[in-house]
Image: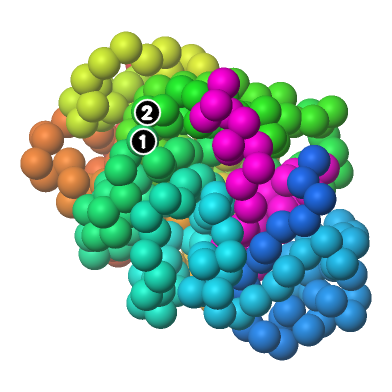
Amino acid sequence: MAEQDSIKEKRIAIFGGGSWATAIAKIFLEKEQEINWYMRREDRIEEFIELGHNPAYLTDVTFDVSRIHFSSDINQTVEQSDILVLAIPSPYLKSHLQKLTTDLKGKVLLSATKGIVPDENMTITEYFHEYYNMPEEDILVVSGPSHAEEIALERLTYLTIAGKDKEKAACLAEKIANHYVLTSVSHDTIGIEYGAVLKNIYAICAGIYYGQKYGDNFHAVLISNAIREMHRFLSAISPGMRNVADSAYLGDLLVTSYSNFSRNRVFGAMIGRGYSVKAAQVEMEMVVEGYYGTKCISEINERYKVDMPILDAVYRILYEKANARRELKELTKKFN
């Protein structure tokens, strides 16, 4: 109880300026009187304050900016906060953290970044534990089927807070729960982190098939095989009890693979229609986490040797310029 009471009084900071960071800020401000918010670009902060909404993402979500303490100084935001909510896309994470000199001792990190740290091939939990000496008990993860656009519309969303410290996880789950966000708690931090990376890869694959006019019948078969592939990988990298049918795994995979809000699916569909990888990235103008995750997981799996035909096919298409139609036709022969 003392742990929960102390967490309740801690100051919240959001890190990131995109749609997911904006949705997370909206959720926290349902209960918090004030939050701190780090954004890299000072001009975006000025526009945000003037307009009362994020000028670039989820522009229909309005904020009482008097309740937000903005800063483009990451050290200032960390120093003035206790719970650090990380919603920076993983490809940009290291460039932001290069400026960080403030000691993270005593801070609690809540990662909302659904990706692997490029070049390091580490999850956010692994990276902060290794390079910032944060105890694993002070690092938590939020995940689940949760498009930022639907949170903006206050459509019912289920989120899971995972962490080794169950009391911290339960308290943070209570902080974000409201009339449109329902929460649960898990101990499977690493499984949920890797699951969030894998579902983006599978969503790209689903998009490529969609772009090539495969239908709903086949899509269901793809997802059935994808969740088994995810289970094999998670069991190899982190053996233990988990139910991949839970919303943090299967639910997140389903929404990312089926929804038009999914940038990974949209990116895949463009590849399926004949776009080059570069052309699709330029037209998207948004970070496609699954592109980077494909390379990271492929390299990680060189150590584990898990049978992952979907991952392998997507990697060959994205990084080896393999013919998408030919690759996916061969992949269909491995499904059941």
Query: Range of the magenta residues?
Result: 1-30
Q: If the image is split into quadrants, where does the C terminus sit?
A: top left
Residue beneath the point at 79% across and 69% down? 54
Tell me if I can see residue 4 in this picture: yes
Residue beneath the point at 22% across and 20% down? 239
Q: In the rendered image, which residue does mark 1 sit on?
A: 137
Residue beneath the point at 37% across and 75% down? 101
| Apparent side of residue 66 relative to residue 222 in the rendered image (left or right) | right
The stretch drawn in magenta includes residue 223: no
User: How many residues crowd around disc 2 within 10 Å: few (fewer than 14), some, or many (20 or more)?
Assistant: some
- Mark sitting on residue 305: none
Q: Residue furthest front?
A: 2
Q: In the rendered image, which residue does mark 2 sit on?
A: 164
Tell me if I can see residue 268 in this picture: no
Q: Eyeballing the image, is 165 above or below 266?
A: above
Tell me, yes or no, whether the two marked residues, 2 and 1, touch with CB atoms within 8 Å: yes
Q: Position of residue 12 (x, y in %)?
A: 63, 52
Pick the front one: 61 or 320: 61
SS category of the residue bearing label 1: helix
Which badge, 2 or 1, comes first in the chain's sequence?
1
- Name the kind of residue labelled 1 in the image: Glu
Q: Residue furthest bottom?
A: 43
